[in-house]
Amino acid sequence: MEKTVHIAVVPGVGYSHLFPILQFSKLLVQLHPYFHVTCFIPSLGSLPTDSKTILETLPSNISCTFLPPVNSNDLPQGVALALQLQLTLTHSLPSIHQALKSLTLRAPFVALVVDALAIDALDFAKEFNLLSYVYYPASVTSLSSYFHLLKLDKETSCEYRDLPEPIQIPGCVPIHGRDFLDLAQDRSSQSYKFFLQCVEKFRLFDGVLINSFLEIEKGPIEAMTDEGSENLLVYAVGPIIQTLTTSGDDANKFECLTWLDKQCPCSVLYVSFGSGGTLSQEQIDELALGLELSNHKFLWVVRAPSSTANAAYLSASDVDPLQFLPSGFLERTKEQGMVVPSWAPQIQILSHSSIGGFLSHCGWNSTLESVVYGVPLITWPLYAEQRTNAVLLCEGLKVGLRPRVNENGIVERVEIAELIKCLMEGEEGGKLRNNMKEFKEAASSVHKEDGSTTKTLSQLALKWSNFGIEKQLFQVL
Ligand code: UDP
């Protein structure tokens, strides 16, 4: 019998950072059952219900340890979300250290894998003689852009959005500075400086595991792994997407899926802005009226308005979001569409045959889910690195359409209606659908026995097992 190989993982804070690293762990132990994964879960305040749901489905060779939750009052107020999430991890470091110390005394651990928002925890890898890996739950294109920023930061002084031309990053589709991630939009900010320091650190680790796959990001993967480029060992282990029924109101879930069952194939546009995306009241009005004007069927996950684009990321509002829809909208569109307050079972929706398009905020998980189920997109990025993902989808993979934003930052109703028509019924929409079909097929082959992801995971498993054997031999000698 093979000896158990132990690894530890630390996810970032928030649902979309917890489930991918757990799904990765599931995939690893499923392919290599002699692995045992221990997950240390940090949280800011209490763990959201949807995060708890995923923990109930874990196999016995994945165990979870909850770290003491960080109190939001202990963090500086008014800092960017990404920084808040990172600081939560900084506050959790002593408990991660303590947990690792007691576990490594009890079992022979070989590797520590942490989410990109938790890289400070990798400082402990040396102390406990563990291999160190970052689990990066986003696109290789975005990671390449971060490394390119290290160079651009030295070569340019203006804000990146003021650079006249799109920037050519090795292996990537050209990206305009205004489409770089949020943190790079204000170069004088503390958050930006802190971010660059974190990117620098990536080179110190034994590798980066990325939730992507060769067929959608061949250029950036090859450019990153080219000898002498960034000195990074990149392992594309995706697409890793959730497979279970997500939480939310059961009645709603049932109702929206039953409603989908009654619609024609490929006829419905699914509209959702991820686990935390929010729109202003003006934008909610325009979107509602645009959906109505398009005359197409829609299924819309509606959130209460906010002036911040990621207001619901860490805390869901308990006000009824439907009260913010334009007057008479629900009545007028009751045959045309369905609205779901706050949260919907996205995987079941995207995999439903009635779905023909996805208006998405381009979070990386939503992006991969759309690819896996072959649904072309209207890309509506809101925050983080979502604009970079939109560029990859629209200009790189050619599976999405991006709306024009007016001078006040609003996408107007006519623009929305036109894009919906173009995606759902136009010739261009047909082309995007065909392109997406090819990526869907590629995504389904990577997990086969000889698929690229299966091979990469076996390579990692072998490396980790060998390291375990070396460690033991060293101890005996
Ligand atoms: N999600 C869901 N129902 C919702 C909204 C989101 O199941 O109503 C899931 C979605 O399937 C995806 C994740 O939440 O797996 C959102 O992750 P993503 O990276 O797309 O965006 P983020 O929430 O990080 O902005």
Image (spheres, rainbow, N blue to C red):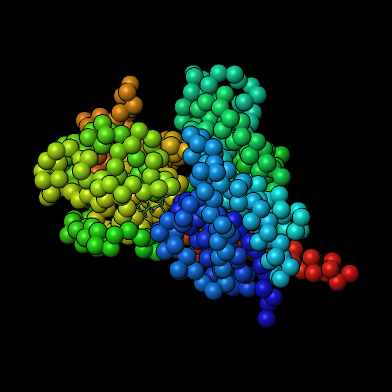
Instruction: Identify which residue is drawn at 24% across, 62% down.
Output: 251
> In the picture, residue 99 is in which quadrant?
bottom right
Looking at the rendered image, the quarter that the N terminus falls into is bottom right
Where in the figure is residue 297, as x and y percent of width and height? 19, 47
Tally of numbered discs? 0
Visible residue check, residue 431: no
Q: Is residue 366 left or right of residue 130?
A: left
Q: Is residue 107 above or below residue 278?
A: below
Instruction: Identify which residue is drawn at 46% across, 55% down.
Output: 46
Looking at the image, the residue that sits furthest to the bottom is 1
Looking at the rendered image, the quarter that the C terminus falls into is bottom right
Q: Is residue 383 left or right of residue 40?
A: left
Visible residue check, residue 295: yes
Q: Is residue 361 above or below residue 466?
A: above
Closest to the observer, 212 or 26: 26
Q: Is residue 474 left or right of residue 107?
A: right
Instruction: Identify which residue is drawn at 66% across, 43% down.
Output: 202
